Image (cartoon, grey):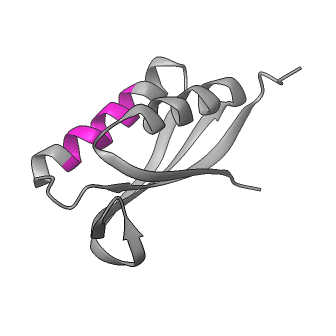
Amino acid sequence: MVSERVREYELVMIIRPEATEEEVLANLEKVSKFITDRGGEVSETKNWGLRQFAYPIEKRREGTYISAKFNLDAQGALEMGKTLTASEEILRHLVTKVE
């Protein structure tokens, strides 16, 4: 059974390189709203900017990297991962638990 205890997580996501600054901010706002709607809290966000990949992802050689630290229960973190996977704007994402 999944514990409902709130944990600290870190998210790193790569947004398609064609995205405008407004679209990048809109994606970050969607993630923040998802977290707060489920009782979580976003403590820090960073835009790392456009970076080159070590290998192509979906035929692209670069993408905009965004990171966020947040508190959320485990079930909410799983739901968020599924939502990010379904997004066409986000090329890759990784959610890790902070110890």
Which image quarter is the C terminus in?
bottom right
Q: Residue at x 42, y 32 (%)?
A: 86
- Residue 31 in the magenta stretch? The answer is yes
Side of 26 relative to 66 (left or right): left
Query: Residue at the right extreme?
Result: 1
Query: Magenta: predominant secondary structure element?
Result: helix
Q: Is residue 64 above or below residue 11?
A: below
Q: Residue at x 48, y 46 (%)?
A: 43
Which image quarter is the N terminus in?
top right
Q: Nearer the viewer, residue 6 or 75?
A: 75
Task: Read off the magenta span.
Answer: 24-33
Side of 69 relative to 66 (left or right): right
Q: Residue at x 35, y 47 (%)?
A: 90
Q: Nearer the viewer, residue 85 or 42?
A: 85
Q: Position of residue 57 (x, y in %)?
A: 38, 64
Q: Nearer the viewer, residue 45 or 62?
A: 62
Q: Position of residue 93 (x, y in %)?
A: 48, 51
**Res. 89 image quadrant:** top left
Q: Is residue 99 above or below residue 31?
A: below
Q: Position of residue 74 (x, y in %)?
A: 71, 30
